[in-house]
Amino acid sequence: MKNYLRDKGAVFRQPQADISQKRSDFIPQAEGLCISNFLNQKWFVKTFLILSILLSSINEVSSQVACSPPGIELVDNPGIPALAGFHRSGETRSDTFYSVTAQDIDGGHAPAVVSHNHVAGHSNTVMLSGAEALVDNSISLGQGSLGSPANNAVLIYMELAKKGELDTLTFETVPFQVSRLHPNFRQKEHFLVGRKGSFLEGVNPVSDQMFLFESYDYQEPGYFSLKMGEEGILENYLLFPGDSIKVRIQDVAHRISFAGPDAALFECQYQMALAGDQRRFSRPSQMITDDAEKFLSRDNYRDRYLTAKNSFGSSLELVEYGKEELEEWMEQWNVPVAKLPEWKVLESYRDRISPEAYEILLADLIGNYRAALLGKFRNEMYGRAVHSHDSLLVSELKELFLEDLYEIDSFSPVLDFSSGWLFYQYEQAYLKALITNTSFSKGVQESYSGDLMANILLKFLMDKFQQIPTKSSFMERIAPFMVTADQKGQLEEYRSKYVSGIPIQDFLFEDRKGKVYSKADFADQLTLFYFWSTGCGASENFYQETFDELAKEFRDSEQVTLVAVNASPTAELWKRGLSSGNYTSDKLLNLYMGAEAQGWKSHYNIHMFPQLMMMDPKGRNLEILFLGQDAASIRDQIESALSVGGNDNVSSKD
């Protein structure tokens, strides 16, 4: 079994109350928590997750989504598009209007201001961040041998309390997480159809459906989500190989209960998520405006605003651009970690979860909180100042970042498992490149090392792929730093799947009548493949809201063929999805990716849906990423590809 922490005598440390303190201010705990007990007990436990869910409680349990608070931040500026999403003050989402984009061209850097919109269908798209060193620096991660699959297997047994037809649940496994915008290497969505239970199995035969899910993908700590359609039930939960958990979700009382050997780990994360939602809900909603008085003078806004402000319930807080907005932001930045209700929850579970789980969750907490703020600083405040040519504010923000906000920490190996800490360090590196007008990749190489450095470079590649003009050369430069199989696999996926001009591997897909299609059948056509899976709510919404419009438009085209390819585990599920009419229609060529195509499916990481791939008439890949684009943006990419025609230079985008 892999030994993550070779130094078994290492003592974990806890940050002082102020999360803005440097690592030197961290103090050792008096109890001196040792890791040896954790190593002896943790890794050989089998996993059973028993989940009883009453369906109509989905809206309640969706509080797990960290970036979906019930508040609002609006933008009142005639020249700037309003934010699309709601959020409480001090929190940020990716619905920002302007962002300054770092590009890394041949090792150089060129800042630019671009329009930036929220990515539809993704619940966590903000960059997350952290603050301090959480673990004694003497800790090092081992590279010991892996255990047998039986020891590492994650077994999830579930019960869904719901009468009527059998339902489909989505089990999302994320053993390696670098981005929350795009599918990660080995990230998969598994769609499971329930079966009726019986009283001999200890369940209610009238209402209970049963699910059994098994995964061998986790050899290290990773993340897991459970969804029904697009609604998150348990979202981005930390888990370990061998975790054993029972979960029951009750509709009438709107509560979730946990049991089993590792129940405390999931219970802790659930309670932390609730505490975070309560913190955001307790704050007034914010509206950013050029002139508060001018805004209130419209219609009867002032009366309505004052009535809500003086009444019990939710209220709106008007914040003006510039100094007032910055003061509000700094107030949130300087909140001590001990003042966060999520931290108090985590502390209450400290003796009930493993030391490593505690440290990763603490890193995620601080990371998520601070990265959201840095994302707002970069996208909304600094980006707006650059766009509006406010040189004084730009100078002030630069000085603030370099003197008070910028700090890096890459010396605590246990943090390599924390996605929140990665996102925080990425934001730090990205802002540093923007503000100092230096190379992003060179700055990362100078400031970081090991897995953290490699993952930051990968995150830049994934999240900014369409904005990197020299894609191939950038991937060549970062390739030597990719050490682990996951890092190498992620890089190779982008080389083979997303870079234009690379021949697409041949495939064998079949239609409903059994006819088999290969690349040769699409010669001399621009072909857009739409990959979907039965039971996937995101696929259903994407087709009905976006792809159906394109299907109608290109149905009789002699140059463009649109193909809907199903990737469900069985042909029966594919045909069920076809019959429903929710995911596709006869306006498209409908094909099934059978068992023979599993190698092709894995090569292109077709495990998250929906996905798009565009193939030119010569069978080469054309760059297209589904980022929540509307029909117009996809149409623009199709028309751009058509305008290139048979030009062999189609591969020269980078």
Image (cartoon, rainbow, N blue to C red):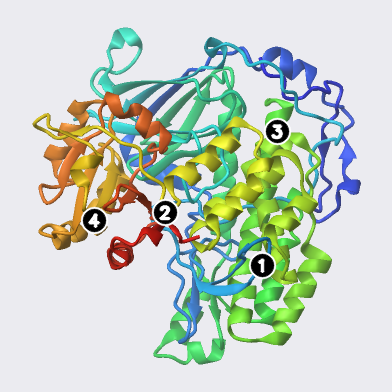
Q: Which residue is mark 1?
A: 109
Of tags 2 and 4, which is closer to the observer?
Answer: 2
Q: In the figure, 395 relative to 193: above or below?
A: below
Which residue sits at x=35%, y=45%?
Answer: 230
Q: Which residue is mark 2?
A: 500
Which residue sits at x=43%, y=68%?
Answer: 84
**Which residue extends farthest front?**
648
Q: Which residue is mark 3?
A: 358
Which tag, 4 or 3, sits closer to the chain's start?
3
How many residues crowd around disc 4 within 10 Å: few (fewer than 14), some, or many (20 or more)?
many
Which tag, 3 or 1, sits closer to the chain's start?
1
SS of the residue at dot 3?
helix
Which tag, 2 or 3, sits closer to the chain's start?
3
Q: Which mark is residue 501?
A: none
How many residues crowd around disc 2 within 10 Å: few (fewer than 14), some, or many (20 or more)?
many
Which tag, 1 or 4, sits closer to the chain's start?
1
Camera-side residue: 120 or 146?
Answer: 146
Q: In the figure, 367 relative to 52: above or below?
A: below
Q: Which mark is residue 547?
A: 4
Q: Amino acid at mark 2?
A: Ser
Which tag, 2 or 1, sits closer to the chain's start?
1
SS of the residue at dot 4?
helix
Alpha-carbon span between mark 2 and mark 4: 22 Å
Q: Amino acid at mark 3?
A: Tyr
Q: Measured from the top left, where is residue 4 in percent x and y?
A: 72, 24
